[in-house]
Every structure is written in C-alpha cells, then in structure tokens.
Image (cartoon, rainbow, N blue to C red):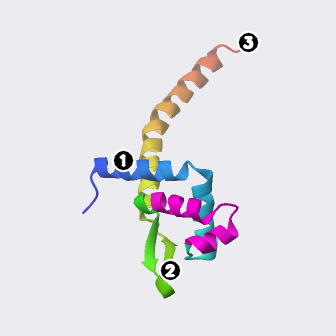
Amino acid sequence: MRPEPADIEATAEQVFVALADPTRRAILAELASGGPATATDLADRLPITRQAIAKHLALLTDAGLVTAEAGERRRVRYRLHSAPMQVAQQFLAAMARDWDSPLGALKDHLDRGAGGDEVS
C-alpha cells in the first residue's frame, strides 16, 4: 500500500525541518559514518553537550530519521532509519519533474526568441 500524498508531504516536511539544523545534520553524519551510538557517544564526537544531543535526537526520532533501541546497561543507542529520507527524496523528485517540463519549454521559447534577434 502506497502512502497518501498528504502523508508523503507531512513526512517530507518533518525531514526538511530536521535537516534544516546543522547540528542535526552532523548527528546524522556521525551515525552514518560510525554506526549506532548513544547520546554520550555522539557528545564525545561532536562539539555539543549530551543534553543538547538528546534534544536533537528526540526531534530526529520524531521525524523518523533515527530509531532508539535498548542497549546494554539501559543505554539507548540510536540508529539511522532511511525510509523518511527516501520519502523526502521522492517528494523532491516529483517536484522537480513538475518544474522540468515548464522550465524546459520556457528555455526553448527563450532560445528561439534569442535566435531571431541576432545581428548578421
């Protein structure tokens, strides 16, 4: 079953909001390169406090970009979850398709007009 367009747009919006912050992008990059990690692990690797990391991880979790899983000694490890990112990519691809045709037609029109105005 495919998600409804409203669901796709809502998911894409959450992803874009999450990705708008450079700290959250850094957290995602760390998880992508280093694998699952705790908030403490991430705070050791990034120039930000553990408390701030935890707040960013909560937003990333709400957006579905990371999942929390129980680790050893009651520590929560965060792992990347790519499905929402794929939904956002599909949203952008659909938007690009909608823009490409009119923009291509405009370019062709302008190219034809510019060709007729050349001085011989």
Residue at numbered disc 1: 9
Identify the residue at the far right of this view.
120
| Relative to 30, residue 73 above or below | below
Q: Residues within 10 Å of mark 3 (few under 14, many from 20)?
A: few
Q: Does label 1 or label 2 sit earlier along the sequence?
A: 1
Tags 2 and 3 touching, CB below 8 Å: no
Residue at numbered disc 3: 119
Local secondary structure at mark 1: helix
Q: Does label 2 or label 3 sit earlier along the sequence?
A: 2
- The label number, if any, that marks residue 75 in the structure image: 2
Local secondary structure at mark 2: loop
Local secondary structure at mark 3: loop
Describe residue 12's horizontal placement relative to residue 31 as left or right: left
Q: Looking at numbered disc 2 in the image, what kind of residue is underneath it?
A: Arg
Magenta residue check for 83: no
Q: What are the residue bounds of the magenta stretch?
A: 39-60
Residue sitting at 46 percent across and 47 percent down?
92
Observer-side mark, 2 or 3, equals 2
| Image x and y of residue 20, in percent | 55, 48
